[in-house]
Image: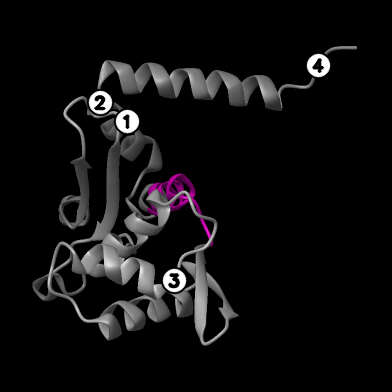
């Protein structure tokens, strides 16, 4: 179980000093040396960067060209690298697409939050005793995050509880 937990990495990157524009990515950080260690299926490094960019956009659709222009302003990257990575994300089911002229328009199949929830459920289900995994997780979150989780649980409980006649 400890090897499993060590193989999961959650990167938190904050774009602003106050954290108002916070972004995060969840990715699989397993190295080739971790053969046989179970890991949460996340994104590779470039896949995570591209998914972050797509999730951060206000637009309903995005193109390879738009993502390439954003990334090439910050790093040396080939258009074909972005194109093949987005095609891979489509084949893996993370992006949907439709033809728009000679190019494709892409959009995510899950929100960032839905993806994070899926990864958390996968980790919870494959990490041994789920009650202990959840307990260890809750022990490590801040008081503010804990309060937010308690409020969310109350809302869910209220929604699931049938009203008395």
Q: Is mark 3 on a helix, strand or loop?
A: loop
Graded by Cα atoms within 10 Å as few (under 14), some (14 to 19) or many (20 or more), the crowding at tag 1 reads few
Can you give x and y, in whole percent of width and height, for residue 61 in the image?
52, 62
By secondary structure, the bulk of the magenta-drawn segment is best described as helix
Q: Distance between the residues labelled 3 and 2?
A: 41 Å
As displayed, is residue 156 above or below residue 134? above
Residue at which label 4 appears: 163
Q: Can residue 43 be seen in this view?
A: no
Q: Is tag 3's residue or tag 4's residue first in the polypeptide sequence?
A: 3
Q: Which of marks 3 and 4 is in front?
A: 3
Q: Is mark 4 on a helix, strand or loop?
A: loop
Cβ–Cβ under 8 Å for marks 2 and 1? yes
Can you give x and y, in whole percent of width and height, for residue 96 in the image?
54, 70
- Residue 121 covered by magenta stretch: yes
> Which residue is drawn at the image coordinates 12% and 76% (left, top)?
32
Residue at which label 1 appears: 135
- The answer to whether 37 appears left or right of 119 in the picture is left
Q: Which of 110 and 17 is in front in this view?
A: 17
Q: Is tag 2's residue or tag 4's residue first in the polypeptide sequence?
A: 2
Graded by Cα atoms within 10 Å as few (under 14), some (14 to 19) or many (20 or more), the crowding at tag 3 reads some
- Residue 8 covered by magenta stretch: no
Q: Distance between the residues labelled 2 and 1?
A: 6 Å
Residue at which label 2 appears: 139
Residue at which label 3 appears: 63
Q: Is tag 1's residue or tag 3's residue first in the polypeptide sequence?
A: 3
- The answer to whether 31 appears left or right of 111 in the picture is left
């Amino acid at each position: 179980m400890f090897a499993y937990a060590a193989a999961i990495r959650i990167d938190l990157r904050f774009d602003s000093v106050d954290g108002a524009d916070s972004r995060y990515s969840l990715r699989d950080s397993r190295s080739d040396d971790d053969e046989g260690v179970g890991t949460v299926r996340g994104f590779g490094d470039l896949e995570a960067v591209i998914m972050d960019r797509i999730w951060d956009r206000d637009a309903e659709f995005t193109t390879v060209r738009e993502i390439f222009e954003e990334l090439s302003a910050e790093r040396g990257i080939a258009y074909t690298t972005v194109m093949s990575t987005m095609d891979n994300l489509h084949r893996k089911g993370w992006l949907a697409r439709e033809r728009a002229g000679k190019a494709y328009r892409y959009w995510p199949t899950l929100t960032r939050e839905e993806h994070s929830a899926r990864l958390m459920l996968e980790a919870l289900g494959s990490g041994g005793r789920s009650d202990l995994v959840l307990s260890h997780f809750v022990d490590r979150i801040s008081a503010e995050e804990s309060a937010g989780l308690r409020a969310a649980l109350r809302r869910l409980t209220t929604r699931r509880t049938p009203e008395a006649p």
